[in-house]
Image (spheres, rainbow, N blue to C red):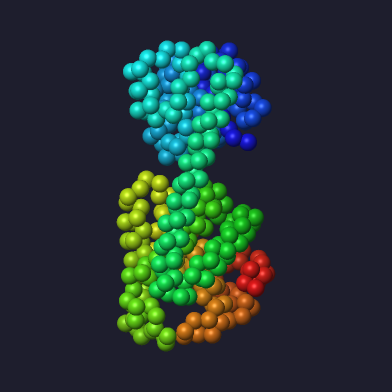
Amino acid sequence: MKKVVMVDDDITNLIIAKNALIDKYDVFTVPSGKKLFRLLERVIPDLILLDVEMPDMDGYEVIKALKSSKNTEDIPVIFLTGHIDPESEIKGFDMGACDYISKPFSKQILLKRVEVQLLIEKQKRDLKAELQNAILKTVADLIECRDDITGGHIERTQKYLRLLISALMRKGVYTDELVLWDIDQFVMSSQLHDVGKISIKDYILMKPDKLTHEEFEEMKQHAVYGEEIIKRIGGGTTENAFLEHARIMAGTHHEKWNGQGYPYALKGEEIPLQGRLMALVDVYDALTNERPYKRAFSHEDSVEIIKTARATHFDPEIVDVFLETENSWRIANG
């Protein structure tokens, strides 16, 4: 159920609003801006109904604070006021309000305005997701055109990431960080973890034999190239949370727990969680599938290799969860 917060110093307005919305929404009422911010420490609503004229902290001060915080800047705000004039209305819209409702308001008008704004927000999110998917699909197809291994690899690693994250959440491992992520967004972003391969020379990327030392050193640069590419994409938009996940994965999925990975030789928890997760699923998929320079290992052999690399290549806590749930990977691997 969508959450709506009503902020008004008039108890009668709070009661009217709650009665109007309670059948469709989870409604919270607070009598002041200060109490709103206390509520926001534990509840992030889908929409805020905000009285303009309040003592101590008026609606303009409240919306300014809301829009200055990353945690609340995207929450739609409808202003409630008994005195609408063009200048005040324009000021409110300039500060980020999405609508105005005149007081006294009817239950029907309040309910309809809330419905409309929540529908608009849903459409915006759906459009954003479609655009993100279109970008990712285009880039992933481009990578696949140059590296025929990568297409299936991208699909499989997304599947394994979901398995791993679900298991970590059930086991209570790294949940403090994982609960802050949009997991669908994170998994979607993983499609770009090898985007840096676009910048690798064809004769290296498509070589059917094992790479020479010099060629491997060049191949290792795909992690840095990937970060740079995603930084350039992200620089053109403020809607880049999923690209931040992608940038981190691209740059750190070849780092090792013992500090002997590349490109930055990060060690232990210096490696972002995104990179530590991607490292394990990336290696598992590489082990269980044929490459020009190696045969495919069985699921059992791959599990043993990962087990042996616990606390050297991989985060030991992530490996422990993987080992406890590896049978689900066997099933997913077919």
The number of numbered discs placed on residues in the rendered structure image is 0
Q: At 42% across and 40% down in the image, what residue appears?
A: 70
In this rendering, position of residue 173 left or right of residue 196: right
Q: At 57% across and 52% down in the image, what residue appears?
A: 175
Q: At 54% across and 73% down in the image, what residue appears?
A: 285
Q: Position of residue 226 (x, y in %)?
A: 36, 64
The answer to whether any part of residue 245 appears in the image is no
In this rendering, position of residue 116 left or right of residue 90: right
**Quadrant holding the C terminus:** bottom right
Q: Position of residue 331 (x, y in %)?
A: 67, 70
Relative height, residue 259 to residue 82 (above, below): below
Q: Nearer the viewer, residue 99 or 63?
A: 99
Relative height, residue 125 to residue 313 (above, below): above
Q: Quadrant of residue 333?
A: bottom right
Q: Position of residue 193 (x, y in %)?
A: 44, 64
Residue extending furthest toward the bottom: 209
Q: Position of residue 92 (x, y in %)?
A: 38, 24
The answer to whether any part of residue 77 appears in the image is yes
Q: At 63% across and 59% down in the image, what residue appears?
A: 167
**Quadrant holding the N terminus:** top right
